[in-house]
């Protein structure tokens, strides 16, 4: 990919509008189309689900799995809550009922998180 003014004395690489780095070196979160996807642009929904056997699971949905490292976010949530969990089908699942605490942690990280359901 050529830069702006490709082949002229003013040639410079195309840069990211957010961080100012060349696009090849940019680490800003982007979705599958390449559009910038910051945490405040990803409305997270946190709700409870009851599984067979009476177990309760806290589920976080609405976060773009391409723009966000869900595994790293899950690891941080698990360590804050002292619970197990997994990433399944682009959703974070955490063992136990931690809906309000997860929503608060996500809001601290910049996600507009809401507790959904009853």
Image (cartoon, rainbow, N blue to C red):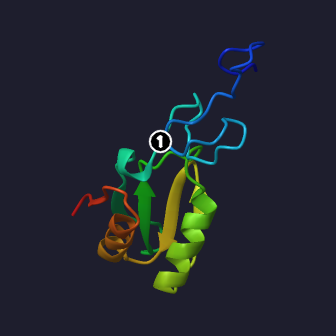
Q: Residue 107's spot in the image, x, y percent? A: 33, 65
- In the rendered image, the quadrant that contains the C terminus is bottom left
Q: Is residue 28 left or right of residue 3?
A: left
Can residue 13 be seen at all in this image of the molecule? yes
Q: Is residue 116 left or right of residue 67?
A: left
Specify the quadrant of the image occupied by residue 88: bottom right
- In the rendered image, the quadrant that contains the N terminus is top right
How dense is the environment of label 1, judged by Cα within 10 Å: few (below 14), some, or many (20 and up)?
Answer: some
Query: Which residue is pictured at 45% across the width and 66% down the height?
Result: 51
Query: Which residue is pictured at 34% across the width and 49% down the height?
Result: 43
In the structure shown, which secondary structural element does the residue marked by tag 1 occupy? loop
Q: Nearer the viewer, residue 106 or 90?
A: 106
Name above or below for residue 81 compared with residue 52: below
Specify the quadrant of the image occupied by residue 21: top right
Q: Residue 15's spot in the image, x, y percent? A: 61, 33
Name above or below for residue 25 compared with residue 110: above
Q: Residue 56's spot in the image, x, y percent? A: 41, 73
- All told, the count of numbered labels is 1
Q: Is residue 68 left or right of residue 111?
A: right
Q: Which residue is mark 1?
A: 37
């Amino acid at each position: 990919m050529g830069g702006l003014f490709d082949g002229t004395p003013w040639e410079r690489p195309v840069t990211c509008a957010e961080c100012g780095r060349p696009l090849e070196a940019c680490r800003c979160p982007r979705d599958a189309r390449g559009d910038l996807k910051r945490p405040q642009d990803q409305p997270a929904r946190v709700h409870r689900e009851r599984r067979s056997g009476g177990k309760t699971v806290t589920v976080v949905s609405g976060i773009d799995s391409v723009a966000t490292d869900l595994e790293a976010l899950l690891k941080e949530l698990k360590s804050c809550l002292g619970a197990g969990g997994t990433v399944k089908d682009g959703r974070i699942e955490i063992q136990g009922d931690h809906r309000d605490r997860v929503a608060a942690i996500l809001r601290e990280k910049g996600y507009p998180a809401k507790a959904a359901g009853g």
